[in-house]
Structure formats: structure tokens, C-alpha cells
Image (cartoon, helix red, strand yellow):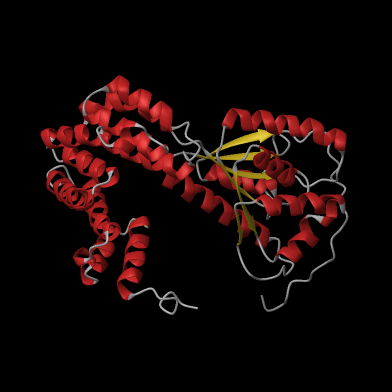
Amino acid sequence: MSAREEGADDRELAYCATLALARMDDTSMALVLYENAGLGDSDDDDMLALRGRLMKDLAEKADSTGQPGLFANASAAYRAIYEHSGGYFPAINAATTALLAGDDETAKSLAAEILRIDEICEPGDYYAAATAAEAHLLLEQDSQAFEAMAAAVNWPDAGIGSRASTFRQMMLIGEILPDRAESVAPLLELLRPAPVLFYTGRMFREDEEAEAGLRGRIETALDDLQPDVAYGALACGADILIAEAVLARGLELNLLFPFQLEDFIAQSVLPGGKGWIERFNACLDGATRISFATEMGYIGDPGMFRYGSTVAMGLARMRAEHLRTDAVQLAIIEQGENGAGPAGTASDVAMWRDLGHRAVIVDPGPIDRKLDAPESVEMPRDV
């Protein structure tokens, strides 16, 4: 059933499309759609706030001469919502964009008002606490800003996306107003997103003793990297061990399979023994997101595995870019292996390094790589 059939009107659909364009960083097209759909004539606060966001996004991309006017437009859009409906979200955005427009007096006046709002005086969630920190920053109350932000990041709802949004806001203040950079720096350290992990590794048979040693080395690597998000596949051996460790830490696991699941199990899970299946299914159940590089089955081409790895790497890099952080590879492979093969762990490491990213290599130790041969699949002649 379509969104329209479910009752969404044209304006709601236009809002969703405009927001999607904004999130894809196509601000100009988003503004065209916003104006053509008449979203600015709505009495819906979310639709009205979207104009403020678009003006702010335009200002970020503008040169120094155009920025003040665009930030002022954004501030006016947010302030109109605040004066109409109240709420700390439009208020803090109006205040910060006023500061970025060079209107220090308005910024401080709004910040002082915000700190008198009940939800901010006694915050009950991450965004309220982070808003208090931002208001203190605008008032040049640096120690209070740090204390409020330190409390904010400890709220249960201080998720990856929420913290990243505040991180980008703080980065923007420091970039546009260099004289505030010193005040912003401690807040950035509190908010700095963890790296995004792309993992890959050797397939092997179940072996409790060998796994125990490797599991310890994986835990050490994760302790050092401290990721919040991981991307990879779920082959027997290293993939499953890493996925289990990621889930045990309560982190976000995103699985990317190169082709249909049934064929992947036959090619990359069962060759290590049937004992991996239960663990494979447990990781599958715990994953945040499951995606496929293609809906095809396996056609006997090892390049399909390489393509799957490439897609997973791309997803990890895109996520890192969105979060303003680094993408790091964790590879379970013997030191010194080259990436000459068409696919596999060594190929993944070589490709990742060619992209200019850091790879953390963990030795697999005494694993048993004598896998059962999967059923042979002959590549179609017309492929």
C-alpha cells in the first residue's frame, strides 16, 4: 500500500521528500521542493522548522560574505516557531543561528530565556540536557556548559545519532566563530563519535581452545577502537566471533550479505561445520540491520564476495562521514598476507588500505582452516 493510500496527503509526502533531500545534502533541490509544495504556508511546526534547517544548511556552504544573511534567515524561521508554539528546540536553534549571523545580543537573550524553561532547568532526557549546555555556551558560561554536556552524554537516550547531531552543531560554532573554538573544544571531546568498524576475517572450523585465544585478541582490539557501530558479513570463524563480541557490548551490528542468505550459508557458514549455524542465527537475530548486495543467488563467481565487501565498506564509510568520524577496519588475518586473490580477507585489507583507511590486523592464531568443500556452483556461460 502506498503512503497516499494510507492517508498521507500531498503536503506530508512533500515534507518527507524534502527532508530526504536535505539529509542527502541536496539543499538546493530540497528548497525548490519546499517552496513549490507550499510547506512554508503550513501551520505544522516540523514543516516550518525544515525551512530553518535548509537556510542553515545553505549558510554552512556559503562563503563568508553570504553566511550572515543566511544564518539570520534561519534564525528568523526558528524564532517564529518558538514565538508561536514555544519549545526549546526552535529556541536553541534560533539562538545559535543568531550567534552565527553575528547577532550576539539576540543569541544571549534567547539563551537566557531557554535556561528558564522548566524542561531545561530539570532535564529529563539527552536533548534537554544538551540544549542546556548549548545555551550556557552561547552565554559564554564555559564551565556550566561542560558540566551540562557531561551530564547529557550519560542519559540513556544519548544515542549515536543524537550525539552526532550535537557534535555537528558544536563543530559549526567552532568553525564559523574561531574565537569560540577554545570554548567548544572540551565539548567536542565529550561528544566525539566513536569510529565506525568494518570487519573481515578468516573462515575456520569450530575449536573452543583456538577461539578462546582469538576471542581475547578481538576483545582487546575492540577495547582499543571503542566503536559504536560495525558493518560486515557473517561467515563461519572470524566474522561470527567479531559479531558476537559486538552484540555482547550492546553495539549496533549491520550485516551485509553478498547474495541470497541460503546460498551464503551453504558457501560461507556450513563449510566450517554445522555447529556454526546456531551462532549464525543468534547473530542474525541480534543485528540492527540486514542488507544484501544483490538479491541474486550465488552463481559461482568469487567476485560476488568482493562486491559484497565493497558495498559493506561503502556503507561503513558513508556512516562515518555522516557521523563526522573515522572508518576503521578490523581484519583477522596473518601478518604479511597480500591481497592478490579475487576475494577474501587479504583482498579486503588491500582494498581498504588503497582507500586510505586504517586497518587493524589481529593474528588468528592456530585456527583450523580445513573447511568442508561447499557444493560446486558453475558460473553461467552467459554471465
Q: Position of residue 94 (x, y in %)?
A: 20, 44
Q: Quadrant of residue 18?
A: bottom left
Q: Quadrant of the C terminus?
A: bottom right
Question: Could you say which is closer to the camera, residue 129 or residue 181?
Answer: 129
Question: Could you say which is closer to the camera, residue 260 or residue 352?
Answer: 260
Q: Position of residue 224 (x, y in %)?
A: 59, 28
Left or right: residue 336 versus residue 312 is right
Left or right: residue 197 versus residue 60 is right
Q: Farthest residue in the top direction?
A: 143
Asked whether residue 170 appears in the rendered view, the answer is no
Residue shown at 31% from the left, 22% from the top: 144
Q: Position of residue 191 (x, y in %)?
A: 42, 32
Q: Position of residue 117 (x, y in %)?
A: 27, 37
Left or right: residue 103 versus residue 239 is left
Residue shown at 72% from the left, 77% from the top: 381
Q: Is residue 323 above or below residue 263?
A: above
**Count of labels shown?**
0
Q: Is residue 292 above or below residue 317?
A: below
